[in-house]
Image: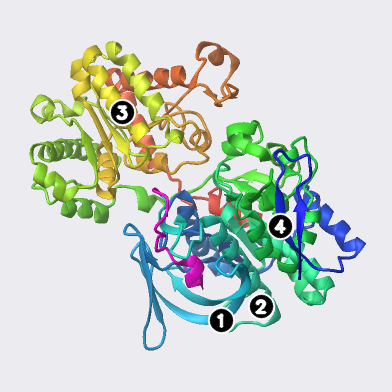
Amino acid sequence: MGIITYKVPSSFKPSKSVTLNLLSPSITTETEKNLKSEAEKRIKGKYSWPQIDRLRAWMVTSETSNFMLMGGLAMVAADMPESFNKIYNKEDDEITIVTPLYTGNTIKKNASLEKSLINFVYTGAEGNKITLNKSAHIDITFYNKKKKKLENFPTDIYYGKWQNTKYIFIANDTFFSINPHKDNPTGREGCYVLNENNIDETERFAFFSKAVFELLKNLIEDKNDYIETPNIIISNDWHASAISGLTRYLTPIKKEKHQISKDTAKKLQETPIVHITHHLGYQGWDFKNTSNILNSLYEDYSSIVYENAKNIKTSNPRTKNTLIVGDTYNHLSCDVGLADRLVSVSLNYCDEITKEDIPFGYDFKDILDIRRKNNTLMGITNGFEKFLISPNQEKINDINNFFDFNRKFFKFDENSLDVKTENKKVFLKLLSKLIRNPEYKERTLPHLDFYKFEDLIDTIKDNIENTPILSATSRLAPQKGYDITAGAILDMAKEMNYKNLPIFILGGAGSEDLYKHLTDLKDKLKKKNPELAKRIYAFRGFNPHFAYAIQLISDFYIMSCKFEPCGLTQMEAMAKGAIPIATSTGGLVDTIIHKTDGYRTDVFYSEKGTLMYGDAVNAKKQKTNFVAYKKTLKEALDTFYKDPKKHKEIVINAMKKDFSWSANVTGSAHKYYKLLKTGKI
C-alpha cells in the first residue's frame, strides 16, 4: 500500500490537497470507463429496474422514532415501514429497518444493551426495549485516528422485531457510543455528538454505510439463518449515502482484483438504491477528515475511485466528482450521483429543489433538474398515522399526570369542539398557576425560560370561546421564520382592535438570538398596544408535555417557515383542530388547502427574492414573504372573529383530514410500494 497526494483539479476553488492510498497496478481501461460513466447512467435511469417478486427492502437509517429520535427523518424511518408492512406483509413483501445500535448517555439521550440468559435486551434512547439475538460478527476496515492507520473494527449484528417490523442493529462501541467528548459542541445531541472516542457524525455514518455494505456482501456470499438478503436499499437521507459509492465503485474494482466473486459483484451492483432526501441543507460535510473517510471507505483503491468518480457534466465545477463538493467530502453527493432514484419528501419540495441554487437545490440544482427530466427524481409527501396525532387519551392522561393539576384536559374530536374550548380554560388556569407559583413552575418546567408571563385568567376567563389562541412550538431556528411572525404581529398591532384580543404562545428550544425576536416583540408592543403585549407568551426551551398541551388547546398554529421540505407539525396541529397559518413552501403546499383546512400565503419567495410560488398578480401586490404572511395572518383572524361558522368548518375539515401512510390507495405507503416494485410512481 502506497501513499500519494492527489491534487484536486484546478477548476475547484479553492483547491486543496487530498492524501489518498494508492495500489499499483491500476484498473483496466474498460473498468475505468465504466466507473467514469456510472453517475450519468444512474442519473438518467439507463439501468432497467429488476423484476422483484418478493420485496425484501432495507430502510437504512441513522435514526428511528422508536429507538433514536432526533427529527422528522426518524419518524419516516419507523412509521413508513411499519405502515407498509401492515399492508403488504400478506403479499409477502416487507421493509426491514437497519440502524446503528447506540449506547451511552448524553443526559437527554440514554441507550444500553444488556445480556440476558438466552438473548439481549436493547433499551433505545426513547426508552423502548427490544429483545435481540446476535446473528453475525464482521470486521470493518476503517481509519483509526489514534494510530493513524487503517485497521479492522470488530462489529456485531443483532436482529429483532418491533411491532410489525424487523430490525437489524449494527453495533460498534467506538463509532456508535453517544457518550459525549469533553469538547462536544453545544447543541450536538444524540447520534450527532462528537463522542468520547473523538468520532464525529460524518465519520460515524461513513462507518455505518461501510458496515451495511460489508453485511450485504456477506449475506450474498454466505446466507444467514436469521437475516434475508435484501433486493433493494432505501437510503434514508445522507447518512447512508456512501453505500452507493461502495456498490458502484469499489465492487467492480474488487471484482477485477478477484477479491469479490463475479456473482457477488453482480448482485451488489444490480441492487437498486432509492434515496430519500429530507432537507438538502444537511449533506454530511467534513473537510478536515476528507482523506481519512475516502481511505476508510475505499482502502487501497481510494485514489483509483477518486480519479474515476466522475459526475454528470453540469455548469457547476464544484460537483464534478461524486465523492466531494468543492474540495470537501460530502456524503449526500454520492447518492445524488449514484442512487437509482431520489425521492423528495413532498411534491412541492421536489419542484423547489430544481428551481434555485440557494437555498433549495444548493450545489445539486442542475443534477436534480436532469434527474427530474429523466424521471429519477420524484416527490412523495410524508405521511403521519392519524391515531398518533389525533387527541390521544393516553397522551392526555400523561400531561394530566405530569402537571398534577386540579383541572384536567379531556379528549375531543371534530364532533365535540366544545371540549376543546373547555381545555382552553384549563390551560389558562395552568398558566396562571405557573405564573403565580414559582416553586410549581420550577418543579414541572425547570428547563423552560418564561419571559414576563402575565396572568390573564381574571381578564378573559368568561370570553375564552371568543378569544383565539395562536401558537408556535417549533425549534428556534432561522428556518422557522420567527422573525416574520414577530414582525407581522408588531406591524398589525394598531389594526388589532378586536373586542377580544388574541393570545400568542411562541417559543421552543434553540437560538438565543431568535428568542430575542420574541422577547423584543413583547417589549415593543407595550408602546403600540399594551393590552396585546400582555397576551404575548414567549418562552425558550422544550418540554413535550407543555408542547402537546399548547397544540391541544390552540385555535391556530403559526408556520411562517422560510423553507419546509415536508413538515410534520402542521399535520399534528390540524389533527388537534389547531389551524395552520403557513407560508406556501415545500410540503406545506401539499398538505394545507387554503381556506378549506388551513391558511397559506398567496405567494412565496426564496431568500434571493425569486418567486417560488404564486401568480404575477399577487406577486405584484405582495412583494415579500413578510407582506404575504401578514395578509394571511389577518385573514385567519378576521375569519375567526367575523365568520365563526366558516372557522368551525375549517376546523372540522382539518381534524377529519387523514395523512396516514396507508390512508387509501393514494397514500404514500402505496406510492412507495409501486416505486420499490417498478422504479416508477
Q: Residue at x 35, y 60 (%)?
A: 106
Q: Is residue 152 above or below residue 646?
A: below
Q: Quadrant of residue 441?
A: top left
Q: Earlier in the sequence, mark 4 or mark 2?
A: 4
Which of label 1 and label 4 is nearer to you?
Answer: 4
Q: Is residue 463 above or below residue 347?
A: above
Inspect the image, locate mark 3, and give the three-letter code of the amino acid beneath it: Leu
Residue that badge 3 annotates: 518
Magenta stretch, residue numbers: 165-187
Inspect the image, locate mark 4, and give the three-letter code of the amino acid beneath it: Thr
Which of label 4 and label 2 is nearer to you?
Answer: 4
Q: Is residue 47 visible?
A: yes
Disc 3, SS: helix
Q: CA distance from mark 2 to mark 1?
A: 10 Å
User: In the image, is 421 to the left or to the right of 182?
Assistant: left
Q: CA distance from mark 4 to mark 2?
A: 30 Å
Inspect the image, locate mark 1, and give the three-letter code of the amino acid beneath it: Ala
Q: Earlier in the sequence, mark 3 or mark 4?
A: 4
Residue that badge 2 annotates: 218
Q: Residues within 10 Å of mark 2 (few under 14, many from 20)?
A: some
Residue 221 rendering spot, x and y as whole percentages:
70, 80
Disc 2, SS: helix
Residue toward you, 18 or 325:
18
Q: CA distance from mark 2 to mark 3?
A: 55 Å
